[in-house]
Amino acid sequence: MSDCIFCKIIEGEIPSEKVYEDEEIVAFEDIDPRAPVHVLIVPREHIPTLNDTEPAQDGLLGRMVLVAMRIARENDVADSGYRLLINCNKDGGQEVFHLHLHVIGGRYLGPMVQRA
Ligand code: 5GP
Ligand code: ZN
């Protein structure tokens, strides 16, 4: 999609620190890391939100999680712990509308969500 930041990163039109690539998935460092490890895992296909995935894309979603586990291992946070996060739409805090899975770790992350 022509005006999507993550599509441009995937295509190499915007620079990024890529840490993993295969035929359907790309992973790169978050530009504004919230923890020592903060990597974004994205499908090459432009899928705006988690809601836009089909049941037939269960394999893709599963492989994104497998890539996240690999990134956690490679960054030595598999045992200390990490968090996988997909923000969806406004209340979920989604800012970039190209599906992405955050891998966050390397420090104690605290409670899952701040209490209201
Ligand atoms: P969201 O809130 O949509 O789940 O997260 C979007 C993430 O994308 C944020 O953590 C933000 O720091 C990251 N981000 C936004 N623009 C860029 C960019 O141009 N390059 C990289 N590497 N990350 C970005
Ligand atoms: Zn996109």
Image: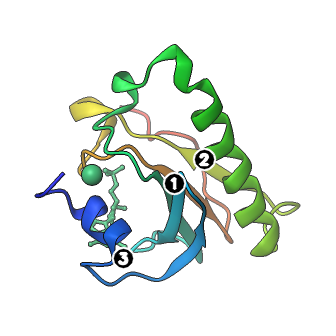
> What residue is at 82 percent from the left and 73 percent from the top?
76
Q: Nearer the viewer, residue 66 or 12?
A: 12
> What residue is at 40 percent from the left and 30 percent from the top?
50
What residue type is disc 3 on?
A: Ile
Determine whether, in the image, residue 109 is placed left or right of residue 85: right
Residue 109 picture location, percent across and down: 61, 57
- Which mark sits nearer the N-terminus, 2 or 1? 2
> What residue is at 32 percent from the left and 84 percent from the top?
15
- Which mark sits nearer the N-terminus, 3 or 1? 3
Q: Which residue is mark 3?
A: 31
What scheme was used to colour the molecule?
rainbow
Whether the residues at callouts 3 and 1 have beta carbons within 8 Å, the answer is: no
Q: Quadrant of the rendered structure where residue 33 is?
A: bottom left
Determine whether, in the image, residue 114 is placed left or right of residue 22: left
- Determine whether the beta carbon of the residue marked 1 sits less than 8 angstroms from the nearest atom of ligand 1: yes
Image position of 74 with respect to 63: above or below? below
Q: Quadrant of the rendered structure where residue 10 is?
A: bottom left
Q: CA distance from mark 2 to mark 1?
A: 5 Å
Residue 95 picture location, percent across and down: 23, 50
Q: CA distance from mark 3 to mark 1?
A: 12 Å
Q: Nearer the viewer, residue 71 or 116?
A: 71
Which mark is on residue 116? none
Give the residue furthest to the front: 23
Whether the residues at callouts 2 and 1 have beta carbons within 8 Å, the answer is: yes
Q: Which residue is mark 2?
A: 84
Residue 99 picture location, percent across and down: 38, 43
Q: Quadrant of the rendered structure where residue 111 is?
A: top right
Q: Which residue is mark 1?
A: 102
Determine whether, in the image, residue 70 is placed left or right of residue 53: right
- How packed mark 1 is, by other alpha carbons closer than 10 Å (few <14, some 14-19, many 20 or more), is many
